[in-house]
Image: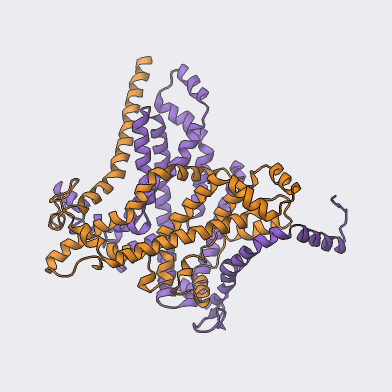
Chain colours: A orange, B purple
Amino acid sequence: MKQKVRDTDFVYNVFTYLIAAIALVITLYPFLYIIAASFSGSQEIYRGEVYLWPVNPTLSGYRQVLSQKGLWTAYGNTLFYTIVGTAFNLAATTIASYPLSKKSFSGRRFCNFFIAFTMYFSGGLIPTYLLITHLGFYNTRWVMIIPSLLSTYNVMVCRSAFSNIPDEISESAQIDGASDWKIFSRIAVHLITPTLAVLTLYYAVGHWNDFMTPLLYISDNNLMPMQVLLRRVLIQSSSELMDIGGSTDDRAAISIQIRYVTIVVATLPILASYPLLQRYFVQGVMLGAVKG
Amino acid sequence: MKQTAMNPSQKDWKKRVKRGLSRDKYLYAMFLPFFIYYVIFKYIPMTGLVIAFKDFKPGHGIYYGEWVGFRWFIQFFKSPYASRTIRNTVLISLYALIFGFPVPILFAICITEISHLKFRRIVQTASYLPHFISTVVLVGIIMNFFSMNNGIVNNIIEKLGGERINFLVNPRWFRTLYVGSGIWQSFGFNSIIYIAAITGIDPVLYEAAKIDGITKFKQAYLITIPMISTTIIVLFILQLGNIMSVGFEKVFLMYSPAVYETADVISTYIYRQGIESSSYSFAAAVGLFNSLINFLFVYTANRICRFTTNTSLW
């Protein structure tokens, strides 16, 4: 009986390690291929010779992509929207959620319901689109920042964090004569820094990956962020990141190589900072799960 | 000192509101700008839904239009697009649920069994990676990997002796690609919550079972899963509640007229009708229908959740 248990346990262990290994391969292989292809010669990719390692290693793809002004404009825009947008988000989320966290706030129930309702029912795409264009946001930088100022879910997470601060702290500050705003800005905000780190991350990634807002509201190329450029290059096969000239066959091959280079160039910052930020993402999942 | 009256008169009520307002005036001041934000960007669009019952023409106010009642709704349901989009929306959600839901759970169970810490950490970290690439990049990868002439997937198929498949133009493959890539992208990240639940199980249970000579297979089946069943049920019901809302972005990036038959969902149909064809009222009507159905499903899912497990979103 004991031997049988040991045997089936062995099978089980093999099974688990196998699944884990498969998961590892499935997750990593696409990235490895993309990197290999980005460093490979265009003809070699075109002929299907690349599987895991760069074939005919070259930097010509990178040279082309990184020398395109359009790429840097788009990158700059994405950085602008991400940094400025997230700053606005954080300020707005903390200020909006602080009153909601105070048990003694007389408008608490009303305001909580007021914002919670928007999570379940909304005007939808068309009325929102009509409103935002009607307000004059079309083709402005503000359209990437103001309409997405608050995420109700994040406001609730922040509200939870604030409400976990012991009342004694704000009460003693009150006795010392501090106003609500002072308590908020000098004390409360500093006490929830882990939550703020997670919120910063969520908002920043949201801005970085935002594709719909520019798709709907921006047509000026100077204001276009990375994601729209990526769509043109990767999915609509635009050749805007390629050098001019060469035969049509060459161009077809180079276009594929360029696409893989573009993926690397666009995703590298995220993937590079990811190990450092992984901790916060995991924390963020738990924050959402344990609702206060 | 609080004043509690058995039958609060009108005067008392007004006094309490006034008192509340003056005592909390700075807090109200803090919230006010964002109250305005919600009114403008969330609630006014809700009122803008009236154009679903009107014949809206652009170039005037956002409520402009002569009243036409349910015309657009009837038009939608009479058209073949209604059944196609609803069917595709539901099928995609169901496939994602049936095939995608168990994967993070199984992965979580496997991962927690791995005793070799370094390997475990590597696999876990790698599994979170796909979560961070944007939808555009993800679809870009799909489009290029599964392309007919140069895609690595077809290259491998051909190397192994098979025939190349035109994945991207064939409607039969759309749901598989959509759901499959979704699973690839999210299984690692979604397993986090299950892993946390599993590590929270009291080890005493396992020890007691071991003394009775239990196999590891039975252990996963009789202890691990029942102990995290609350988490599983809650997440399942919540995902079920979202069955009528398939995200617009990924479908929009992945589809093409060739695959509309299986790929066109309600949200993409609304986009094409409203934004591309400027049939604002019609699209708003379809959107209203979708929002209401969604609300119904999510609300029901939440009630069921609360009723059966004492936990819910609220």
Q: Residue furthest front?
A: A176
On the picture, is A5 further left or further right than A154? left
* Residue A179 rendering spot, x and y as whole percentages: 71, 54
Against B258, is B297 above or below? above
On the picture, is B146 further left or further right than A151? left
Against A230, is B6 above or below? above
User: Who's the residue at 34% across and 50% down the image?
Assistant: B180
* Residue A169 rendering spot, x and y as whole percentages: 69, 43
Q: Quadrant of residue A279?
A: top left
Q: Nearer the viewer, residue A222 or B176?
A: A222
Against B160, is B86 above or below? below
Residue B83 makes an appearance in the image: no
Residue A130 makes an appearance in the image: yes
* Count of picture labels: 0
User: Who's the residue at 52% across and 53% down the image?
Assistant: B241
Q: Quadrant of residue B109?
A: top left
* Residue B189 rendering spot, x and y as whole percentages: 42, 45
Against B1, is B266 above or below? below
Q: Nearer the viewer, residue A197 or B275?
A: A197
On the picture, is A217 further left or further right than B16? left
Q: Nearer the viewer, residue A18 or A73?
A: A73
* Residue A120 rendering spot, x and y as whole percentages: 57, 59
Q: Residue furthest top?
A: A2
